Image (cartoon, rainbow, N blue to C red):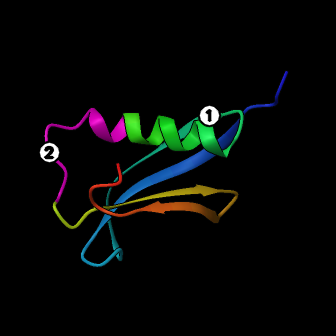
Amino acid sequence: MNKRMKYQVALLKDGGIVAYESTALFAADNSEAIERAKHWTASFDSVAKDAWLQINLNGVGIRSLRPGEF
């Protein structure tokens, strides 16, 4: 069984410098974290058109998704 790790997820706007929504989630690996982060963003009624989705593990960015990629 894989150990679940804690990821930090944020929606950023204004060129990626302002976080306007964030959460923490647990996942077994980076792929699962990315899918869970995408699912989290889908729970919002709307997302800023210039929003970026940033996924971090232990303070290191594992993936940044541009608008249209999440």
Question: Residue 15 got which mark?
Answer: none
In the rendered image, residue 47 lying in the magenta stretch gets the answer yes
Q: Quadrant of residue 10?
A: bottom left
Of all residues, the one furthest to the right in this rendering is 1
Give the prevailing secondary structure in the magenta stretch: loop
The residue drawn where x is 54% and y is 60% is 63
User: Is disc 2 placed on a helix, strand or loop?
Assistant: loop
Answer with the quarter of the image where residue 48 lies: bottom left
Residue 44 horizontal side relative to residue 23, left or right: left
**Residue at (71, 33) in percent of width and height:** 28
* Residue under pointer 1: 26
Measured as percent of width and height from the top left, residue 43 is found at: 27, 32
Residue corresponding to mark 2? 46
43 left or right, relative to 2:
left
Answer with the quarter of the image where residue 52 lies: bottom left
Q: Earlier in the sequence, mark 2 or mark 1?
A: 1
Q: Amino acid under label 2?
A: Ser
For residue 15, side relative to residue 22 (left or right):
left
What segment carries the magenta color? 40-48
Figure check: 47 above or below 16 = above
Q: Is residue 41 above or below residue 54?
A: above
User: What amino acid is found at the position of numbered circle 1 in the picture?
Assistant: Phe
| Magenta region includes residue 31 | no
Foreground residue, 5 or 66? 66
